[in-house]
Amino acid sequence: MTNTKYLLRLSILILLFSCNKNENTNEETQEQNDLDCSGDYSTAGILVDINVEIYNDDESVNNYSRYSWSSDGIERILSGNGIPNHEVGTFPNADNPNAITEQNVNKRFTLCPEIITESGLEVIGPALAIAYALNSVKFDPATAGRCNNAGECSLARGQGNWNIEALGHDTFDFGDDMNHAHVQPNGEYHYHGMPELLIEFLGDNQGMTIVGWASDGFPVYARYGYSNANNSNSGIKSLTPSYRLKSEPNTNRPTILTALIGGPGQGITNPNTPISMGAFTQDYEYVEGLGDLDECNGRFGVTPEFPDGIYYYVVTDDFPFFTRCLKGNV
């Protein structure tokens, strides 16, 4: 996509948002006043009047990105086609043989999110998406890749106890692009980590940028937050997770990749390929207070959209890249 086309479309989108914001301020304020949340948090009136259709002429897309966010006064409603509104990598590619296709994205999120567990509930399996970006592209940080104790691995529906990570190592390649995203077999483009060009598209890659909503109704921000979580005048910093690599691998962890038996590259044997630390989810440990964020890669604090404070999740540059658990009800 040329810079001229990109800037023109970005300007149109900004105009769309600006017009909607001016025309619906009273309506959104009324929604905030009308909704009586029993818990501590309300997201009513925030980003509930978005309706975008924009053509993405990236050679791997060549389709309209359509997405809308609205509200019925109780729930936030997402409707979209899962087509990214920004440049992507080449798909299919050698490590990801899938083409991007339209999806039917229709999701609802509570406007009154509540913390129901301090430790978070792990989100497992494809039945529940952990979050959606503003452009209706799914956040899906885990993979279906597995290894067994013998080092026999598959990048698709693998067997074994060792969960392969998509990012943060060089052992396995899932064909992800500059947005830390790739495509599932059903054609669904999805983010495993920082959606770089979505952030750029939204126009603020140096400040707190809301990039989506988690399935429990809490907002998702990318990379940055206030240095003092409760002070919007404290300056912006890159927020850090509280995870680190373990000093020693777990017992029975495979250290050598002996075979790829499914997914891209299947049938290739690699009898002497080391499996680096960081290739498996189990290679990491959470240390409370090590970074800025909790075990679900979130924290409580003030944000531009929530000056009185709210719990929010953060997409980070380091593991876990995006939350693997949710603190609210879904």
Image (spheres, rainbow, N blue to C red):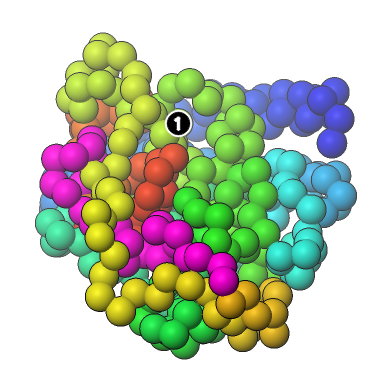
Residue occupying the point 40% across, 43% down:
318
Q: Which one is in front, 257 or 290?
A: 257
- Say if the magenta span includes residue 280: yes
Relative horizontal placement of residue 315, taking residue 78 as reference (left or right)? left
Residue that badge 1 annotates: 209
Query: The magenta stretch spans which residues?
Result: 272-294
Position of residue 15 measured from the top left corner of the image (x, y, whole percent)? 67, 25
* Vertical side of 6 occupied by 120: above or below: below
Relative horizontal placement of residue 174, taking residue 250 as reference (left or right)? right
**Which quadrant would the N terminus be assigned to in this image?**
top right
Q: Which one is in front, 295 or 41?
A: 295
Give SS at disc 1. loop
Relative horizontal placement of residue 272, taking residue 223 as reference (left or right)? right
- Mark 1 neighbour density, 10 Å: few (under 14) some (14–19) many (20 or more): many
Q: Is residue 114 visible?
A: no
Q: Which one is in front, 305 or 280?
A: 280
- Type of residue at label 1? Thr
Residue 220 sits in which quadrant? top left
Residue occupying the point 79% across, 53% down:
90
Position of residue 250 measured from the top left corner of the image (x, y, whole percent)? 26, 70
